[in-house]
Amino acid sequence: MNKRKINIVIMGSQGCGKGTQAKKLIEAYDLQHLETGAILRKMAQGDTKIGKVIDDIINKNGEFVPWSIVREVLDEAMDSVDKNKGIIFDGTPRRMEEVHYWDERFEESPHWKFDFIFFIRLPEEESVKRLSSRRVCANEHLLIFGKDVHAEIDKCPICGSPIHQREDDTPEKIKKRLAWSKEILGPVVEYYQERGMLTEINGLGSIDDIFNEIKSHIDKKL
């Protein structure tokens, strides 16, 4: 396989499975994973002032973290990446401030660019259904209620740790996030579509079908 360094953006509707696809792409193309959501959730668990602020925003209110905080996260993450390996950008850009941030950053560092941008589209009803049935364990293994686990007292089948539902995965907070996502992410999708940089993927297929479709688009250009 061609080992040329590539950078991939994977974005999409809530619950579309972009995290799962990101992990498969990381393995297939030897990529680093820059996942803003995971970084913010980890910060929210910390006993720090900023951690408590993020916890209130994400878990208590089910809202998006302000751009001022996300920008600090991105700056720190990019300062620590391996410059010789490609990256899968998961969770960014998802607002126009982030689009401008990456445009400016790549203009200053021409060796960095988005080689592929994929948007996985999923109907709202399916997003609510999937996220409501999502469970995670203490080690952040993603599980499906009714498939991987069948009771709230079950343990993670992967590592044996307790499972729980994320505070922001209740139907009310999911619908709130979906409404904001449509309003905020819509212009980002349109921006990259107009520049011919974005490929839309149907999120209703199986995990393997979606992965194979994404992979085919990448391999054709390598």
Image (cartoon, rainbow, N blue to C red):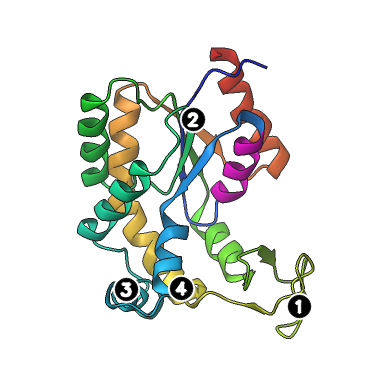
In the rendered view, tell whether residue 132 sits above or below residue 126.
below
Is residue 12 found left or right of 187 in the rendered image? right
First to last magenta residue range: 17-27
Question: How busy is the neighbourhood of tag 2: few (under 14 within 10 Å), some, or many (20 plus)?
Answer: many
Q: Which residue is mark 4?
A: 168
Tell me whether circle 4 and circle 3 mark residues in contact (CB < 8 Å).
no
Disc 3 from disc 1: Cα separation = 28 Å
Q: Is residue 20 visible?
A: yes
Regarding mark 1 in the picture, which secondary structure is present there? Answer: loop
Mark 2 and mark 3 lie on one chain; the one further toward the N terminus is 3
Q: Secondary structure at mark 4?
A: helix
Dot 3 or dot 1, earlier in sequence: 3
| Residue 182 shown in magenta | no
Residue at mark 2: 86
Examine the residues drawn in magenta and state their main secondary structure.
helix
Marks 4 and 1, how far apart at CA: 21 Å
- Image location of residue 94, percent across then percent down: 34, 47
What is the spatial separation of the Cα atoms under label 4 and label 2, in whole angstroms? 31 Å
**Residue drawn 25% across the image and 60% down it:** 69
Q: Nearer the viewer, residue 58 or 7?
A: 7
162 with respect to 8 (left or right): right
Q: Quadrant of residue 205?
A: top right
Residue with the mark numbered 3: 57
The amino acid type of the residue labelled 2 equals Gly
Using the numbered discs, state the Cα–Cα distance from disc 2 to disc 3 in whole angstroms. Answer: 31 Å
**Residue type beneath disc 4:** Asp
For mark 1, what is the residue?
155
Q: CA distance from mark 4 to mark 3?
A: 10 Å
Q: Amino acid at mark 3?
A: Ile
> Residue 58 falls in which quadrant of the image?
bottom left
